[in-house]
Amino acid sequence: MTAHAPTVTIASRAEHVQRIMTPGGLEVWLVESHAVPLVALEFAIRGGAAQDPAEKPGLATLLAATLDEGAGPYDARGFHRAIDELAIHLGFGADRDAISGHMQSLSRNVDKAFGLLKVALNDARLEAGDVARVRSQLAAELKRDANEPDSVAAKAFREAAFPNHPYGRPVRGDLSSIDTLSREDLIALRERLFARRDLKIGVVGAIDAATLSELIDATFGGLAQQNDLAPVADISVANVGQRNIVELDVPQSTLRFGRPSITKHDPDYYAVVVANHILGGGTFTSRLFREVREKRGMAYSVYSHLNEYDHCPMLIGAAATKNERAGEAIGVIEEEFRQFAEGGPTEDELDKAKKFLIGSYALRFDTSTKIASQLVNLQLDGFAPSFLDERNGRIAAVTMEDCKRGAQRLLGDGGLLVTVVGKPAGV
Amino acid sequence: MSFETKASAVASLSPGAAAPAPARASIASFRLDNGMDVVVIPDSRTPVVTHMVWYKNGAADDPLGQSGIAHFLEHLMFKGTKNHPQGEFSNLVAELGGQENAFTSYDYTAYFQRIGKEHLATLMAFEADRMRNLVLTDEVVDPEREVVLEERRMRTDSDPAAQLDEAVQAALFAHHPYGTPIIGWNHEIEELDRQHALAYYERFYTPENAILIVAGDVEADEVAGLARESYGKIPARSAPPRRARTQEPPHRAHRLVTLRDEKVEQPAHEQVFLVPSYTTAEPGEAEALETLAYMLGGGPTSALYETLVVEEKVAVGAGAYYMGSAVDDTRFWVYATPAPGVTLEELDAAIDRVLRRFGEEPIDAEHLQRAKTRLIADAIYAQDSQSSLARWYGESLATGLAIEDIVAWPDRMEQVTAADVQNAARKWLDRRKAVTGYLLPA
């Protein structure tokens, strides 16, 4: 038993994590649990949409979406039917910094599930007809979102915040270029990204270390040793202080706001986490919730959130209010930022925020899939399993002075990059 | 409230005892003297509990002219009681490291928290208090009405696709309240006030009308004791409120609903059929509809997808969905996104051919087996998430099913035959009585 916080004692989480090095030299973190006859696996390969060629945004997303459209001995239909026959959940996705995969299987089918994952990862056919079909689905999604306020706001924010940087490009592609993404482009990207080097794997469920090791080697062992990642520059949110408006004929103005934050490895990181929680985290307790929603009825949803992209840690927030009140809402939000940066939290706020963040950590570990994701994220962030036992202590150690400093580092002079979509008044 | 300071919990990554599927024997259920039902679902893998109270009333029970009142009251339930002022409950849940929220559907309203198991008694005391002692003032009600209007602007009034869905459902249910959106119509939300909310609260927030679901690492006996001490103290109010809803007359006409908006760049097609729910269906019929929905449109192995998207290439996406949990007759959706250059009329004809084939040609036995395997396996996957299980039980019980119905569901799914699926397609997917929705650019 390790005590982390004055008020909560909890047994070790880390001691349940088996850090396995397979005979083939791959690292995998396992939490073995036979409570439910299931196995969940999550993995991530560093290098996602930020690796898309500049003129071909959406390529990593298209690659991830085409991996299960025919592979090895299966055509697309055969592959999907095999997945269904075994009742496996298998899927791939791309975000800015990684391509990730998810697999969940009943214990009795786990060998076959790994077999299907293996062919998707190593031998996806990426045939032109299948690529065209998936591409048309992505294009339809882009059209569906073309005038959807949240998507429009995200685009305007991204372009203002990350000019001339891969993060400024759309992860899911752009209608003007999506038709140029070819099978050859996908194969080239796969060759650059899919490798053992930056591969992180987490497994939870009814499987022992020896069995898992063999399956991991069989599944991932054939990947190349080295990837070939293009360098991505570290940046900071640009154009802070700017307000951008995109006109859209809707009754509500959708706001997105943000500014720079600090990295997870900064000594003040947990001070910033606590500060953000007080400002705009949680469900019904933050300052933004109280001032914008509860007191003034200006928005259904209002929050701020820490977004730790590999190359640009940031705070991002959102709200949506009727056009008539858009200017007023921005004013209230900016005022909260300014006040918090200047005055910091009250003792009571600090105490309650720490208690929430410590106490609710357990809720991130209540399903196999959630635990497996945590194991992958820890590896991506470069932490050891012991972090699972240390994290709450880091929250507990945040003092009033730390939190005030964190609030100042996070909020600076309170300036925000704001994008507004709608027909806002008073902006 | 005091904060529990000596919480000693087993870390949630611990493997836990080997627990079999939550069979009937492991799920405890009982009724308190005041008529409130209690269900306890064991999950010893993690020291967390999911605590939910389900009220057997939803938007379909809104009084005429007060659409949205069930949902509005759900928001107002966070405004404090005579014992605990606004914010006290939510602040306490947060301080104890819990998460909370609530949701309203057509047939039920539910409140839930997820929290360390040692705090269960505290939550039960507060939630029981909220069942009886809500206090509403215009001061808190007025801004919350604005919040709900913003919620509607966000979800529906800025989104042509959501507006089409609303119009399609209104067309399908010409008489039954399922035709009215859960959140309500704007002109009626604007008129809702604290009297409406309190009258609705008095009518429905009673122990006879409520179901307590606790899932997690707790013993049934312990929950029973805690429930008697909290919810059990609320006096019985006599019989549960009647859910008297106007029922839909037989449908005879096909209806086409078209929404054009300059914001639409991707047209879409949807079609909805009036079908029996798990609650209203003859034995086996709902299971057949569930299987039919999966075979017809449950992902890339489905008939609609394979035919329209892969073979004919008239659509880029297609699917089907059966909304089986409902007190009254319910909806079966078929939807598709046309490929570039394909009109919605052409797509409609292609969908029609697939549906007809299901009714007329022999059902592919392998396809049927794949669908059943997948659907039955989902019941095993659900065991990995205590909150999913709690929600499954709550939704089923609140729409009139019994625990036995839930436990026996995989067995009943096993028994679905090709003839059952074909009969369901013939009987219920009658396009002459359906509602079709077209989403188009202006």
Image (cartoon, coloured by chain):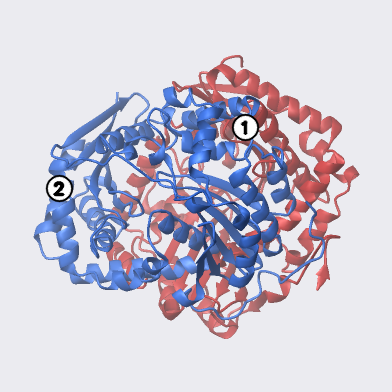
- B296 in relation to A332, above or below: below
- Give the foreground label among 1 and 2: 1
Horizontal side of residue A347 vs B63, given as left or right = right
Give the class, few, some or many, for how many residues have Cα within 10 Å of label 1's Cα (few <14, many ≥20). Answer: many
Sequence-first disc among 1 and 2: 1
Residue B249 in sight in this render? yes
Residue at the right extreme of this rendering:
A401
Image chain in blue: B
Q: Position of residue A339 (x, y in %)?
A: 80, 28
> Which hue is chain A drawn in?
red
Q: Residue furthest bottom?
A: A210
Circle 2 is placed at which residue position? Answer: B430
In this rendering, is residue B234 above or below A299?
A: below
Question: Which is nearer the eye, B347 or B328?
Answer: B328
* Disc 1 to disc 2, C-alpha distance: 48 Å
SS of the residue at dot 1? loop
Residue, x 23% and y 46% (percent of image)?
B274
Q: What quarter of the picture does the C terminus of chain A occupy? A: top right
Chain of the residue where label 1 is placed in the rendered structure: B
Where residue A259 appears, x then y in whole percent? 70, 34
Q: Amino acid at mark 2?
A: Asp
> Which residue, given by chain and number where applicable, does mark 1 sit on?
B136
The answer to whether residue B90 is left or right of residue B405 is right
**Quarter of the image where one finds residue B214:** bottom right
Mark 2 Cα shell of 10 Å, populated few (<14), some (14-19), many (≥20) = some
Q: What is the x, y in percent for residue A158?
A: 58, 35
Image quadrant holding the N terminus of chain A, namely bottom right
Front-most of A223 and B166? B166
Left or right for A404, reference A242: right
Residue located 24% across and 41% down the image: B248
Q: Residue at x 62, y 61 (%)?
A: B228
Q: Is mark 1 in CB contact (under 8 Å) with mark 2?
A: no
